[in-house]
Image (cartoon, coloured by chain):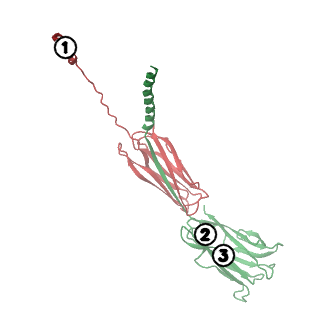
Chain colours: A green, B red
Amino acid sequence: MRLDKRMLALPILLTTALSMIGFAYAHWSESIFINGTVNMGSLTVVFSTYEPPMCWDKDDLTKDVAETTCWYDNLVTDPHTSKEGYTKMWVVISNGYPSYWVHCTFILQNIGTIPAMIDSLVFSDPEGKLTWVSVTSNSGYFVDGAGKPIINIEVVNNVPYQLDPCSKNKMEIDIDLKQDALECHTYHFEVGIVYEQWN
Amino acid sequence: MFTILLMALSIVGFAYAHWSESIFINGTVDMGSLTIGFTTVTKCTDKDDGALKDIGEVKCELSDPVTDPHSEKTVYKKLTVTITNGYPGYWAECFFTIDGAGTIPGTLVGVTCKAPPEINVECRGVPLQVDPCSAHPASLYVDIKQDALECHDYVFECVIEYTEYN
């Protein structure tokens, strides 16, 4: 008799379970999709291949004692625009003397796709022997260990300024050697042009 | 014997002589439909639209149309957002409407966005319930983080899931 009651209860339980599953399946549902792609641009400012850097000095027209040579180095290609340019410029002065000066021009170009802000100039001695003393944001002088001025440098262009993609800007730099520069000595300096995206 | 036969026949005859009637319930269930999708892209805007330099660009397109058999109204199942020439700090927002093309309201189950860490993606204003024939405004906001790489393509996907309202 007990067994019969259980057998009766079994279909009821089964129906209830199925109805519960049926309830879950009976709900309609919908999904909608948002698909997105972000193609990033590029920020690349270089020394332009448009023309090589040009340098002239104090004694070119008189006694041509000292010599200055300058060139670009480290060719890079922007992967976005496939345009080329250089990331380094060398200026080498040989047989220099106090009061000798050099004037160099070069062209900066934005070969990327994002406008650049030419933000600041960083002057340094890669060997750490000279120390930069800043006068303005684009000029100053290096001093030796005794604090004596050795080299004056001024970038003629004021910073900051914006350089748009595909745009060029001619820049100029003046270098002159001071009274306390040592004979038969080699000095090194580096001018970093710091840029960032415009916004 | 004859009497017994008569009695038996009368019993059978009694049974056949009973009137009988049947009544019927006929049922028809016209099912509704749950069809939810995008209807229009109302506006796409970005950080530098009003600025002097319009560098980054954003484009929003609807695709994958579905026509509800019940209402014959068409909605789109897919919204594609394409940003070109992006840069860190750039943001874009696409405004669109979500509509119920069917006859049954839908309730939001959830919004899931899969995006690389360099990209921040937010679905804003997604309606909790979408009624039939009522366009609900919502938007997708995208902004690019500092670590995004140059000349790189980032892909993301958001799924907005609805179930019937009850």
Q: Is residue A119 left or right of residue A131?
A: left
The answer for which chain carries disc 1 is: B
Q: Where is residue A109, by image quadrant?
A: bottom right
Q: Amino acid at mark 3?
A: Met
The x, y position of residue A106, in whole percent, is 63, 76
Q: CA distance from mark 2 to mark 1?
A: 116 Å
Q: Is residue B82 left or right of residue A110?
A: left
Q: Where is residue A183, by image quadrant?
A: bottom right
Q: Amino acid at mark 1?
A: Ser
Q: CA distance from mark 1 to mark 3?
A: 127 Å
Residue B124 in view (yes/no) = no
Q: Residue furthest left?
A: B2
Q: Are marks 3 and 2 in contact (CB under 8 Å)?
A: no
Q: CA distance from mark 3 to mark 2?
A: 13 Å
The x, y position of residue B44, in whole percent, is 49, 54
Q: Are marks 1 and 3 in contact (CB under 8 Å)?
A: no
How many residues crowd around disc 3 within 10 Å: few (fewer than 14), some, or many (20 or more)? some
Disc number at residue B80? Answer: none
| Eye-nearest disc, 2 or 1 | 1
- Is circle 2 on the same chain as circle 1? no
Q: Which residue is mark 3?
A: A89
The x, y position of residue A133, in whole percent, is 77, 70
